[in-house]
Amino acid sequence: MENNLSLKEKIIGTWRLISWVYKNEQGETVDYFGKHPTGILMYDKSGYMNAQLTQSERPLFETQAMSDGTDAERVNAFQSYVAYYGTYVEESPGVIVHFVKGSLFPNWIGSQQVRYGSVQDDRLVLRTPLMITKNGNLIFELTWQRLGEIESS
């Protein structure tokens, strides 16, 4: 019966980021947030979603107050973290659209982020459409692993 489910039905749940890569113009695979990015992606059955992605081992601020960080600390914190939330639909088979309601990157607020997805066992792979960046024309591929129930101690 699992194979008869739509992608939207298959992705409901919580996912842990395994990798975030792209191929550069030389065809080499590049780890966008390093070899061991961390993150969580949540889809609920009501149509809400939340994504948090970060480089591992981010440098700490010298101070404990977010507002007291240096310009360099704040720039690094912004560049090493992606966060947004909103709603989602399966626009057509295998095509998920995130309707961004809030984002660390303000330009995404009100945008539609398209992702091409597939689920195999406990893995979700999401690909972006072609994106034009300072690193060239890229397609990002993110691999997620489904998380199970939290064990109570």
Image (tube, helix red, strand yellow):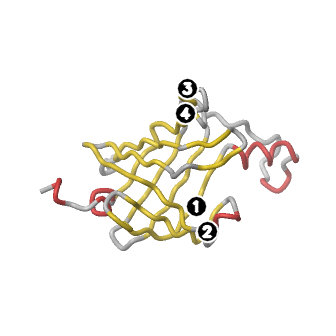
Secondary structure category for the residue under label 2:
strand
Q: What is the total number of numbered labels drawn onto the structure image?
A: 4
Residue 31 lies, with reference to residue 41, above or below; the image says: above
Is residue 110 placed above or below 127 in the rendered structure? below
Q: Which mark is residue 28?
A: 3
Q: CA distance from mark 2 to mark 4?
A: 28 Å
Q: Amino acid at mark 1?
A: Tyr
Kind of residue at badge 2: Gly
Residue located 62% across and 43% down the image: 137
Q: Which class describes the residues within 10 Å of circle 4: few (<14), some (14-19), or many (20+)?
A: some
Residue, x 46% and y 48% (percent of image)? Answer: 127
Q: Measure the C-alpha gap from mark 1 to mark 2.
A: 6 Å
How far is disc 3 from disc 2 in space, using C-alphas?
Answer: 33 Å
Task: Name the residue beneath numbered marker 1.
Answer: 84
Look at the image and tell me in which quarter the N terminus lies. bottom left
Q: Are marks 1 and 2 in contact (CB under 8 Å)?
A: yes
Of pointers 3 and 2, the one earlier in the residue sequence: 3
Which sits earlier in the primary sequence, circle 1 or circle 2? 1
Q: Which residue is mark 4?
A: 23
- Dots 3, 2 in contact, CB < 8 A: no
Q: Which residue is mark 2?
A: 102
Mark 2 or mark 4, whichever is nearer to me: 4
Q: Position of residue 73 (x, y in %)?
A: 81, 43
